[in-house]
Amino acid sequence: MKKLTRPGAMALGLGLIAVGCSSQATQSQGAITIDGSSTVFPITEAIAEAYNQMQQNPVNVSVSFSGTGGGFEKFCAGETDINNASRPILDAEIAACDDAGVRFLELPVAFDALTVVVNQGNTWAEDITLEELKTLWEPDAEGKITRWSQVHSSWPDQPITLYGPGLDSGTYDYFTEVVVGEDSRSDFADSEDDEQLVQGVSRDPNALGYFGFAYYDQNQADLKALAIDAGNGPTLPSAATVSSAEYQPLSRPLFIYVNFASAQSNPALREFIKFYLETAPEVVTEGGYVPLPEEGYHIAWVNFHEGEVGTAFGGEPQPNLTIAELLRKTKRF
């Protein structure tokens, strides 16, 4: 369990602790600024809209995305109150937050199946092995592995066009860590906006790309998901295969990180987090993600309420993590 070097848990007190103006409190009273992962963006955006519909005086909740890494740059500079993240915070980001005096609360909110997709017009590929994915995406493939037949001999001798998240994306970080183990090839069409990746693959019969399951789930008329063979046979991404830990290693937890000082000084932010964790199971399910068990949201609320700052995930992407293992980590936090 990795903590910041400053003192550990401090009770938020949910309004019982009076806190004056702080350089870490990023916004005026009531306003909430959120950035980060495009994968988590639809969850947070939906919850923010539902939250404001319940308020007599709507709160100014700003939700945008710049990728997990891009979001952490802003978050660790004290510019945002919440960072959406499709991977745990990394060592370098922990150090940046610590150097800037930004303590944070880490709250898992869902699980996702990182999904490898092709165009619906692709008639030859139904599944792909991790080794084939590595052959396609490793740095040595750049400028060399450019045709489908080079990945699998039975596939046609046609050009292959690759689409993937930008370098600031947690999805890029996770996929690269799990599939390649180092930096990816760079000659692919990239974007921090998953909708642009969806459009690219849906328009190109020779395309292959990857992004969060929800973006595939909402565009199944134009996209086809490839089953992933990690050595035990091909497995398609779904809520069931993520929950049963069959869809590995491309299952991953999703998080929100909350600025501790902002949570102390802004009652609206505390109420928003409470509402977020209460409504997340329904919103997550409707959005195509996999909700945590009820215990998971309860643990997250307890950790938030008690002010457990820092991370339980060691500053690394944590491949092959299951829902059960996530609960054990956060419970020991």
Image (cartoon, helix red, strand yellow):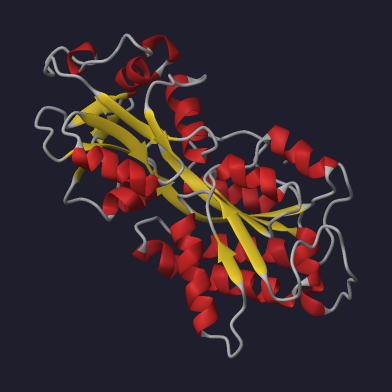
Q: Quadrant of residue 191?
A: top left
Q: Is residue 168 left or right of residue 186?
A: right
Residue lying furthest bottom in this view?
A: 56
Q: Is residue 242 above or below residue 122?
A: below
Left or right? Give the position of 9 relative to 239. Answer: right
Q: Position of residue 122 (x, y in %)?
A: 13, 33
- Above or below, 117 against 79 in this view is above
Is 59 displayed left or right of 286 in the figure? right
**Residue at the image position 17 percent from the left and 32 percent from the top:** 126
Q: Quadrant of residue 105?
A: bottom right
Q: Position of residue 1 (x, y in %)?
A: 72, 41
Regarding residue 130, the answer to whether it shows in the image is yes
In the rendered view, tell whether residue 66 sits above or below residue 151.
Answer: below
* Residue 102 drawn at (x, y percent): 80, 50
Rendered image quadrant of residue 94: top right
Residue drawn where x is 26% and y is 15% of the image: 146
The residue depicted at 38 percent of the width and 34 percent of the height is 164
Q: Nearer the viewer, residue 116 or 49?
A: 49
Residue appearing at x 42%, y 67% in the figure: 283
Q: How many marks?
A: 0
Asked if residue 306 can be seen in this view, the reply is no
Question: Residue 73 placed where, x, y %?
Answer: 68, 43
Q: Is residue 290 left or right of residue 321?
A: left
Q: Nearer the viewer, residue 221 or 323?
A: 221
